[in-house]
Image: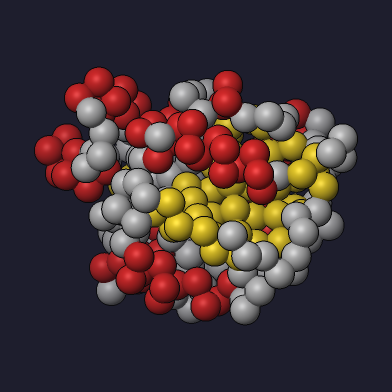
Amino acid sequence: MASSAVPPPVDGVVLVHGGTCAADIWDELLPLLRFPAVAVDLPGRGSHPADLEHVTLAHCVDAVMACADAAGFRRVALVGHSLGGVTITEAGHRNPTRVQSVIYLGALVPSTVLSAARRVTGGDLPPGRMPRMPEAQAKALFGNDLDEAQWARVAARLVDDAAAIINATVSGLPLACHRVYIGLSRDIPVPPALVDAMVGVLGPDLQRITLDTGHMIMNSRPELLAATLNALVRTGRD
């Protein structure tokens, strides 16, 4: 595991869920972490009511930083899964003195000209509410390494989303903070070839790690993910 820089110390970590998910997607992981951490509900999900027709990337960034404030995290690391990569990228750009580290986990990485939707499909999605996909399709994409009980828990947590997030570009790159990309070798929605095509915008000093799991590692292999994050995150007490 090579790194060009030692991760800077932080007060805690905000876990940012991906598309059609909410904060509860991290429930299996949180008890295994050895550092202060909270999971955010982005607007329109879970404990954060909002009209998904009108949710923007800026609203999501505000929610992440408000979650850090509520937890008392002045210096923060952000972990973004899947579509959460868009939010943590913009949050890191907008809050350079607070966001010390961004950790992408099987995440989509937009640029200042290419949205996540364009990265994946070649074009943006229809604006407004982005409905969750049919369960059979979702299972084929997200459940390839989940057993039936694990998939049942994931399926029960899936929700609608806001297309404005997957259609958004970011305000500036590369980020000044410490950056890590955790790729997942059996990831179907964000396969290794797509990762290779995306991560160049994150800068040449990006730390890269590859784990042998599918997309929903926090549900299929929470112990492995916890061990990886525990080795990456350094708090002021360390």
**Taking the image as drawn, is residue 18 in sight?**
yes
Residue reaching furthest right? 237
Q: Which residue is drawn at 87% across and 35% down?
A: 237
Residue 33 position within the rendered picture, expressed as x and y whole percent measured from the top left? 62, 30
For the residue pair 234 and 17, the one nearer the viewer reads as 234
Asked if residue 77 is positioned above or below residue 4 in the image, the reply reads above
Q: Quadrant of the C terminus?
A: top right
Residue at 57% across, 44% down: 228
Left or right: 46 as drawn, with respect to 78: left
Residue drawn at point x = 72 percent, y = 30 percent: 36
Q: Which of 164 and 219 is in front in this view?
A: 219
Q: Where is residue 92 in the image (x, y as percent from the top left)?
A: 68, 58
Q: Would you say residue 23 is visible in this rendering?
A: no
Which quadrant holds residue 142?
top left
Left or right of 33 on screen, residue 118: left
Q: Where's the N terminus, which quadrant?
A: bottom right
How is this picture coloured? secondary structure
- Residue 22's spot in the image, x, y percent? 45, 32
Image side of residue 236 versus residue 117, left or right? right
Splitting the image into 4 quarters, where does residue 63 fall? top right
Residue at the left extreme, as displayed: 136
User: In the rendered picture of this protein, how many numbered marks are placed on residues?
Assistant: 0
Please tell me which residue is depicted at 70% across the width and 55% down the height of the picture.
Answer: 101
In the displayed structure, does residue 200 sit left or right of residue 187? Answer: right
Please state the horizontal and vertical placement of residue 126, each as a whole percent of the image: 28, 59
